[in-house]
Amino acid sequence: MIAPGFLTTVQDLGRFGWAHFGISASGAADPVAFRAGNLLVGNAENAPALEMTLTGGEFQFEGDAVVALTGSDFGADVPPWTAVPVKSGQTLRCGASRGGARAYLAMRGGLDVPNVMGSASVHVMTGVGGRSLRKGDTLKIGGAWVRAARPPARQAPQYSPRTALRVTEGPQAAWFGPELCSSLYSVSEETNRMGIRLKGPALTNPGGHMITEGVPLGAIQVPPDGQPIVLFVEHQTTGGYPKPANVISADFWRLGQIRPRDEVRFELVAMEAAVEMLRLQEEWLYSI
Amino acid sequence: MTIRPDSDRSLFLSFGEQISPEAHQLVRRAVQALHGTRGILNLHPAYTSVLVDFDPHLFDHEQASALITGLLEAHRGDAPPPERLVEIPVSFGGESGPDLPDVARHTGFSPERVVELFTRPEYTVYFVGFSTCFPYLGGLPPELATPRLSAPRKHVPVGSVAIGGPQAGIYPIASPGGWRLIGRTALRLFDPAGTPPPLLRMGDRVKFIPEALT
């Protein structure tokens, strides 16, 4: 690791089975780009890979490797969404993002890093699974490939500073009016893997009494100031703020590509539609 | 019990609206019955409810709901999970508990009396949640209830023992927080490099042992 970039961490698809101890799953912020990277280099889709945020890192290879860069275009010197060979001694440089917030560097064989509680994902806030990478760190490439590398991906997703997020009704939807889906929000600088904080017209918080309850990934919670927060991969496992809506699973990848100052709006869909959209996304993912 | 969709990959199991030892036992037994089931990815217990995250590639809400109700029914007669008593040594007041004077002022007791009342009962870990192994303790004497800080602290030291409204808790990691800090324990509730279980689990009983009052 010659330069780490803004925030580069080892990720997989998450650490499941510990929410009853207050530990959320963490995992890749854009699971679609993450899985695509692994599929392209011939790995199992959960193999540990690197997640870069806003500004990418610089990596020197001390052996021949096959890698794929997916997610947002970070101006790297290799073609994106394609498995490419790199030679021993070669350096791969990424720059600032030209689109979304995150890019993934998957290596054929995955990364040989220890699992903590069954996952290699770094939970940045708590330090579970390790820490973000620093200059001078070395990582070993593993032997976890399962098939031949695939041809370049067709129809890679496009990232825009204006995102429409589809939502289903949340558990306290009846407490709120239709404002959430008719307003435009700006993404706050205080956005991270725990939560995406939005700024816009305040939602009227009815201030009803709520007992603290479990909260899922993608839940939109409204604190007393009326500014919604989308709970993200390192979210708290329980919370006491009302939730008018929940981002659908098929749009989780969009959450991972949202940058501070982007514009966000919400679009309500039925639960059945959300399930169907996830099915279509899986079909696309396995067609690449 | 009622069960309803929460997100497109989760179901919400509710055991009523009243925080009570009875609801707590139902929550505990539900977690015991559902834990480790294929396709159930995460369980989020709280005072009177359990949020169940399921794998949307395996089940839809109807199938997950049938699986859950079937498991709860099948495990209805199981013995409840064992309860443990965990003693937590606490240094009260001073730098360890900077808000002890405020709690004393709010409740009208002397700091010594606050500590005496606080350490008298056995608490129950209603659930572990929020952020990394935070135990929500039931059993705080009602006369010690003190409102949270109007603006949360940016940095609460690890091991801080705190009162937040009618609840008590212990901060397992250094984090922001708005509860009133009355003491600190050197016991580590959570080791990020280790593998859980954390020191305190849902259903455990907790007794605070005063070390010193500074």
Image (cartoon, coloured by chain):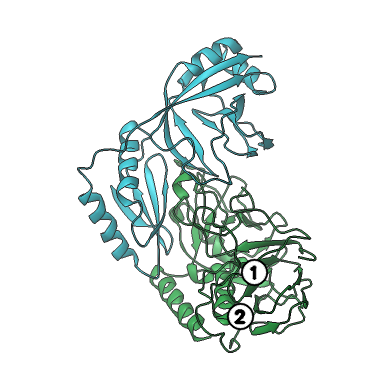
| Residue B60 image point, x, y percent | 34, 67
Per the image, the residue denoted by label 2 is: A157
Q: Would you call the spot at circle 1 few (<14 residues within 10 Å), some (14-19), or many (20 or more)?
A: many
The answer to which image quadrant residue B8 occupies is: bottom left
The answer to which image quadrant residue A1 occupies is: bottom right
Query: Badge 2 sits on which subunit?
Result: A
Task: Say what amino acid the circle numbered 1 marks.
Answer: Gln
Q: Would you call the spot at circle 2 few (<14 residues within 10 Å), some (14-19), or many (20 or more)?
A: some
The residue lying at 54 percent from left, 74 percent from top is A35
Per the image, the residue denoted by label 1 is: A257
Q: Along the horizontal axis of the image, is B202 left or right of A194?
A: left
| Residue A272 image point, x, y percent | 38, 71
User: From what the image shows, is residue A12 above or below residue A241?
Assistant: below
Mark 1 and mark 2 residues within 8 Å of each other at the beta carbon: yes
Task: Say what amino acid the circle numbered 2 marks.
Answer: Pro
Q: Earlier in the sequence, mark 1 or mark 2?
A: 2
Q: Is residue B24 visible?
A: yes
The answer to which image quadrant residue A213 occupies is: top left
Q: In the rendered image of this protein, which colour is used for chain B?
A: cyan
Q: In the rendered image of this protein, which colour is used for chain A?
A: green
